[in-house]
């Protein structure tokens, strides 16, 4: 006969006590004269003096209260033992996790997460899927002389034995141009037991360091004069405007690149496209240098919003906000013709916009374009470590057939290599879009927007605009 999960005791005062069988495993030695010869079945609350086929000898228990105290002690011992086991298991996993990062064993890190696991990073959208999460860890490993350490301060296990969470500390240190930088913070990991193995279901962390003080506009205080600022998608973007509208007006919006650096302290201004806009502003041509969400200019004017500048820069909220700014400027200046002129990341954003909003823009000039983001990241890092970014090549079929596309890349560009833009243009031509690829001999990634080839394309588009 299988053992019942509970055992029933009778006191000398004929009171019923129903206790978990687990209690006797831990407290049998402290029960005095109690002897349990065979398993008991659960009995009803109605006292009866006959238990079929079972016997018990009850010794020195005189009160119900004493038995309850023993019950409580037994449960505490059982739960403590279980929690200690879980703590030891998770501590062991954390040690292996840190070592796997140091050894660049990202297959092991991927296996730590559940297939539908989620990673919640500061200032960015949730990362879902264990493969995408592993790619994040891999991208961190590429930061110069990076060192990561973490450990649990406390582990809490569910009574069911298949769920737990731990929270603790972490350090994240790496080299920058200004020396060693270190972040310290805290984390929470939710664990789920699957086939006797603990897997990460959810993972979140945040820094203990104070947030940097940023001089920024807010959507509420934004000076939305469409000359120095424009409201878009609930954000306030900084702009610099040259030229003025006329009876027939063209709008040219210049969009800067990513300016990537691993340390936010090294981030510099992103207004290098202002000077280019100044060259084209005149009566009938409104030329605007736009500062992307989360970036700032040389005077410390910040656009609001999230740049996702640490990684995965071309997420949907960025695209939507920049497109909304272009739409607002087009409406304000009553522009009949709209040109987007981008550099690097600004070109990627422009390339997505013409597919997502096919009636918004008439022509794009894509300087040093990472027009196929997964291919670009793979060429740069060996895999696509920006899984959330939108890519121009995914929107080719949605571009209006009347849109003109010029992709200009330096022959010595080792960042956005020429093959990326060349293949993108070839794909556009195959579906009948007026697309041109120009490779500038001797030019690299930076300053492609200063080449005569880049500037002459913009000039020609303006001459042919009506």
Image: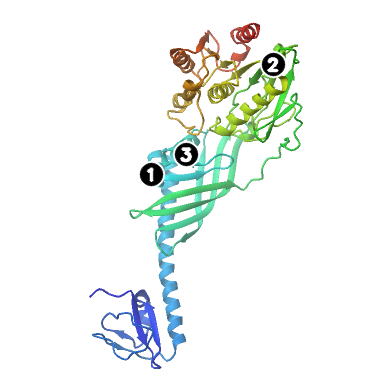
Query: Does residue 294 appear anywhere in the picture?
Result: yes
Q: Secondary structure at mark 3?
A: helix
The relative height of residue 440 versus residue 344 in the rendered view (above or below) is above
Quadrant in which the N terminus appears? bottom left
Quadrant in which residue 134 is drawn: top left
Q: CA distance from mark 2 to mark 3?
A: 39 Å
Left or right placement of residue 234 versus residue 392 in this view: right
Rendered location of residue 270, percent (x, y): 66, 25
Residue in the image at 65% along x and 25% along y: 327
Dot label at residue 10 = none
Which residue is the site of mark 3? 137
* Mark 2 vs mark 1: in front: 2
Left or right placement of residue 150 versus residue 293 in this view: left
Rendered location of residue 253, percent (x, y): 65, 19
Verify CB contact (< 8 Å) between mark 2 and mark 1.
no
Quadrant in which the C terminus appears? top right
Rendered location of residue 305, percent (x, y): 64, 35
Residue neighbourhood size for the residue with mark 2, other residues' Cα within 10 Å, grouped as few (<14), some (14–19), many (≥20): many
Q: Specify which label sits upstream in the sequence, 2 or 3.
A: 3
Q: Secondary structure at mark 2?
A: helix
Which residue is the site of mark 1? 111
Dot label at residue 277 = 2
């Amino acid at each position: 006969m299988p053992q019942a999960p509970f055992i029933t005791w009778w006191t000398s005062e004929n009171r019923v006590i129903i206790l978990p069988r687990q209690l006797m495993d831990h407290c049998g030695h402290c029960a005095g004269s109690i002897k349990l010869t065979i398993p008991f079945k659960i009995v009803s609350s109605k006292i009866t003096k006959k238990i079929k086929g079972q016997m018990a000898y009850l010794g020195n228990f005189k009160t119900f209260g004493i038995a309850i105290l023993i019950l409580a002690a037994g449960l505490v011992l059982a739960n403590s033992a279980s929690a200690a086991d879980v703590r030891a298991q998770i501590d062991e996993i954390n040690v292996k996790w840190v070592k796997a990062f140091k050894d660049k064993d990202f297959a092991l890190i991927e296996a730590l997460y559940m297939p539908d696991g989620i990673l919640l990073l500061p200032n960015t959208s949730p990362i879902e899927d264990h493969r995408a999460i592993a790619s994040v860890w891999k991208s961190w490993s590429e930061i110069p002389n990076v060192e990561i350490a973490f450990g649990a301060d406390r582990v809490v296990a569910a009574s069911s034995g298949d769920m737990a969470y731990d929270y603790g500390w972490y350090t994240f240190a790496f080299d920058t141009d200004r020396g060693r930088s270190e972040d310290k913070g805290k984390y929470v990991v939710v664990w789920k037991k699957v086939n006797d193995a603990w897997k990460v279901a959810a993972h979140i962390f945040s820094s203990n360091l104070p947030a940097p003080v940023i001089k920024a506009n807010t959507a509420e205080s934004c000076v939305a004069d469409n000359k120095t600022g424009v409201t878009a998608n609930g954000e306030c973007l900084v702009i610099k405007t040259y030229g003025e509208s006329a009876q027939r007006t063209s709008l040219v919006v210049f969009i800067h690149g990513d300016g990537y650096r691993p340390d936010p302290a090294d981030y510099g201004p992103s207004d290098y496209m202002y000077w280019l806009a100044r060259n084209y502003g005149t009566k009938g041509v409104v030329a605007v240098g736009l500062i992307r969400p989360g970036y700032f200019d040389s005077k410390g004017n910040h656009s609001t919003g999230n740049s996702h500048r640490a990684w995965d820069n071309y997420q949907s909220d960025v695209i939507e906000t920049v497109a909304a700014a272009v739409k607002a400027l087009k409406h304000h200046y009553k522009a009949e013709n709209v040109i987007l002129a981008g550099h690097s990341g600004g070109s990627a954003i422009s390339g997505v916009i013409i597919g997502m909003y096919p009636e918004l823009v008439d022509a794009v000039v894509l300087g040093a374009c990472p027009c196929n983001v997964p291919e670009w990241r793979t060429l740069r890092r060996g895999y696509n470590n920006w899984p959330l970014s939108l890519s121009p090549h995914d929107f080719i079929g949605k571009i209006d057939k009347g849109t003109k596309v010029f992709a200009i890349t330096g022959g010595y560009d080792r960042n956005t290599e020429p093959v990326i833009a060349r293949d993108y243009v070839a794909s556009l031509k195959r579906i009948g879009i007026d697309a041109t690829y120009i490779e500038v001999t001797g030019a690299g990634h930076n300053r492609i927007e200063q080449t005569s080839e880049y500037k002459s394309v913009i000039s020609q588009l303006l001459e042919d605009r009506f």
